[in-house]
Image (spheres, rainbow, N blue to C red):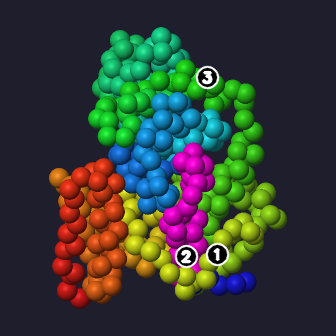
Amino acid sequence: MTVLGPRALNRAALARQLLLARVDAPVLDAVTHLGGLQAQEPQEPFVGLWSRLRAFDPGVLSGLLTDRRVVRTHLMRRTVHLVTADDALAWRSRHNAMLCQRMLGVYRRDLSGVDLGVLAAATREVLADGEPRTTGELGRAMADRFPGPAARVLGEAAITVVPAVQVPPRGVWRATAGARHVPFAAWLGRDPDRPDPDPDLVGQALVRRYLAAFGPAASADLRAWCGVAGLPAAVAAVRPELVAFRDERGRELLDLPDAPRPDPDTPAPVRFLPAFDNAILGYDDRTRIVDDAHRGLSVAGERAVLVDGRVAATWTVDSGTVTVSPLRRFSRADRAAVAEEGRALAGFLSDGASTRVRVAASPRQ
């Protein structure tokens, strides 16, 4: 079985994540291909798509949100993701058990004695008027029926047991708005549980979609991306369609046969990633893109800079100034390339207004 080294896996990941070269693709197609973008920080997906698409227009993504073709909802790993409406409807039922399990992992003691089926019925009743509500408002509306839990806890549980989306202007370009929720059925015209989807087929589709955007990858990587248990049967069902490799640790990696696996020596341009980008978080073994010493940066919400395809710096923006903080020593060429891409990013974030890029001194080795 062919062994893929770290650079081969890195270049494959960059190609699948549209980070090896910006592509000319419609925004909706890019969101579909990527399997969504993690989006608990509402403005971060705009940077993620700017780094991947040529001539990205943030107004197009905002329009997809207001037109209900893209939605913000809790999905993979019980984090807020920006996904197409079609994927939200197709995938939600397969994520239900994981979403409830993770919610109870946080609030089980608070919700002791609360029947989640009764809570779901009460939630649907409260939201039947179509009025978007915050989790606090939703919880307060049901407080009489479920005394004990705090309103916020009740609300968080409610939007878990009843599939809900965060409605615009939350997530619109440069909009500042709190998260207000309505059920899938009211916003998209269809409940993801009706008609009852075949969980086996949904699982198999998840496997194929994951490998298209992240492969070659191990089963543990797939689970790290979506958080869903019970996918080994789906992997086994699609295995005859796939090709297999091994990494240098001996793990089996599966992939779609015709997916891109570029030459390991393919040049990788500097790229600025937003907070919580799935190019990093979408794997159990993240060493293909970030050193173990810096693994925690992505979980902490640090924005990363890729140099030669790997996390080499973090970045912040304040008052039009993009500041890059290297994690390793930069060559003169590295600093120039980072500064050039940083200026382009600063221009995007400020609509071409006066901007500045500062690349801090490299750390001592």
> Which amino acid does the dot numbered 1 rest on?
Arg
Say which residue label 2 marks: 11
Crowding at dot 3, Cα within 10 Å, few <14 / some 14-19 / many 20+, comes out as few
Image quadrant containing the N terminus: bottom right
Q: Main secondary structure of the magenta part?
A: helix
Range drawn in magenta? 6-35
Q: Which residue is mark 3?
A: 189
The residue lying at 65 percent from left, 61 percent from top is: 212
Q: CA distance from mark 2 to mark 1?
A: 7 Å
Mark number, residue 283: none
Q: Earlier in the sequence, mark 3 or mark 1?
A: 3
**Are circles 3 and 2 on residues that touch, CB within 8 Å?**
no
**Is residue 58 among the parts visible in the rendering?**
yes
Residue visible at 50% across and 81% down in the picture: 267
Residue 105 relative to residue 136: left or right: right
Q: Residue at the spot x=48%, y=15% of the render?
A: 130
Tag 1, which secondary structure?
loop
Q: Which residue is located at x 37 percent, y 40 percent?
A: 173
**Residue identified by numbered label 1:** 261
Name the quadrant containing residue 290. bottom left
